[in-house]
Amino acid sequence: MALKDAWEIPEFRRLLIGNGVNMLGSSIFIIGMGWTIAEIGGPKAYGLVFTAYFLGHLPLLLYGGMVVDRMPRRTVALIADLSQAVLVAIAMLVLMAGFDVIKTLLVITFLTGGAGAFSIPAIGALVPDLVEEEVLAQANALRGVAMTAAWMLGPLIGGATVEYWGIEACLFIDVVTFLFSGAVLWTISEVPIQRDEEAESLRDEVIEAWAFVKTQPWLFAGIFMFMIWHVGDSAIEIGIPFIIDSKGLGAREFGLFGAVGAGGAMIGSVIAGMKPIPKESRGTVFYMFIGGIAWCMLMWAMPIPFWLILLFVLIEGTLGGTLGVIWRTTMSDSVDQHLRGRVNSLDAIGSLIFIPLAPVLGGWMIETTNVLTTYSIAVAFMVLTTTAGLIVPSFRRFERIEHPDFPITLDQSLSD
């Protein structure tokens, strides 16, 4: 199978375009917001705005996953896009009226984080609804390309936009992209959810999904290990604008930093789509690349020229793009259709549960010590945690495991 086989599926192609434009607007907003907050409030305020996002996001993820497993995924994503368009438009008008910038951005980040708790699992579960299993790797690779293309162009546009026209212009672009994404989703058919039983309570729905997670060692371990991984990763993200500033550079270079990382992720996605990683090798490649990512991140804080930092950013992005395709493909071909929304939500909650604390902690550490010390501590925890994925065979076996409570269906490949 080639990438064009997935591209030739009309509704999947429209989803890629709409979601790619959506991500473009989001990346423009995040870069503009990040630079604005960092310039006005410093590391602690910059960390606090990301904490606000996850405080709005995490509590609703389980409910969002349940909704995604009950309603057509296209409809959930459409409502979430239109809701975010309204919220961002209100924030733009409030800023234009002269309200406090940091407080306004904290509130809008919190609210859009809540809406994202529905759209993220909806899009993730919709992809395998639209394509057959034999082209899932190619479809997820194209999705990675679309996302990273957005995250490559978005920082460049966002950095220039916030520097010349301010955060309000970034918000306006974000509103337009949400509306465009919603219009595209409207053209996609509603795919019914295949369920054998009547809808259960939220508690029962979560118990069922968690029971499935525990039958799959690769999934359980991945969720647990990334609880710790993302704490370090979040602290590292807080340091980026201050690395840029310490070199006498500005918003455009901050945008360039993000664009180069996204460009690397695009390269990794294309490679993983053109030559999919075999099931038996997915886990080994995944955890080896994670270690490489951590070491690349540490190099960002070193006293080296900016162009050399960008080289490590490019390598980190390439490895990350490959990892994204591996994980999304495994989640797509190894999770039952009626469980995908909830399992995606549990994956996100487990991976991100400590993140509300991490940006604030990272900002405090940077102000108390320095960027290099903060990065060194963060990377040490990241490397130690994910090494377990290489050591334990069942953790790196990225395949569906047979279990009496969750039998293998006809559209899934039985593990060897």
Image: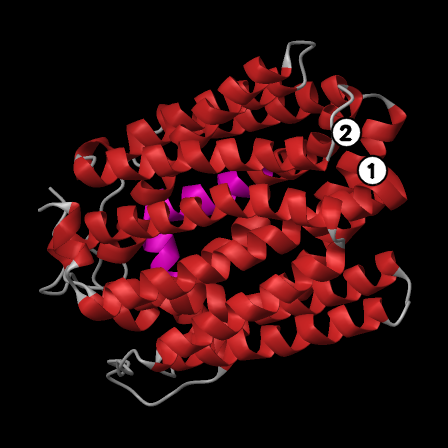
Q: Is 232 in front, or is 139? A: 139
Q: Is residue 245 magenta?
A: no
Q: Position of residue 300 (x, y in %)?
A: 62, 20
Query: In the picture provided, is 261 more to the left or to the right than 398?
Result: right
Instruction: Classify 10 Å Cα crowding around label 1: few (below 14), some (14-19), many (20 and above).
Output: many
Image: 70 above or below 229: below
Q: Position of residue 180 (x, y in %)?
A: 46, 72
Residue 110 circle label: none
Image: 309 above or below 142: above
Q: Are marks 1 and 2 in contact (CB under 8 Å)?
A: yes
The picture quadrant where one finds residue 214 is bottom left
Q: Is residue 211 magenta?
A: yes
The residue shown at (82%, 64%) is 104
Q: Residue furthest front?
A: 164
The residue under label 1 is 43
Upstream in sequence: badge 1 or badge 2: 1
Is label 1 in a helix, a strand or a loop?
A: helix
Image: 333 above or below 308: below
The picture quadrant where one finds residue 322 is top left
Give the extent of the magenta segment. 210-228
Q: Is 238 in front, or is 21? A: 21
The residue under label 2 is 242
Is label 2 in a helix, a strand or a loop?
A: helix
The residue shown at (35%, 61%) is 17
Residue type pointed to by label 2:
Phe
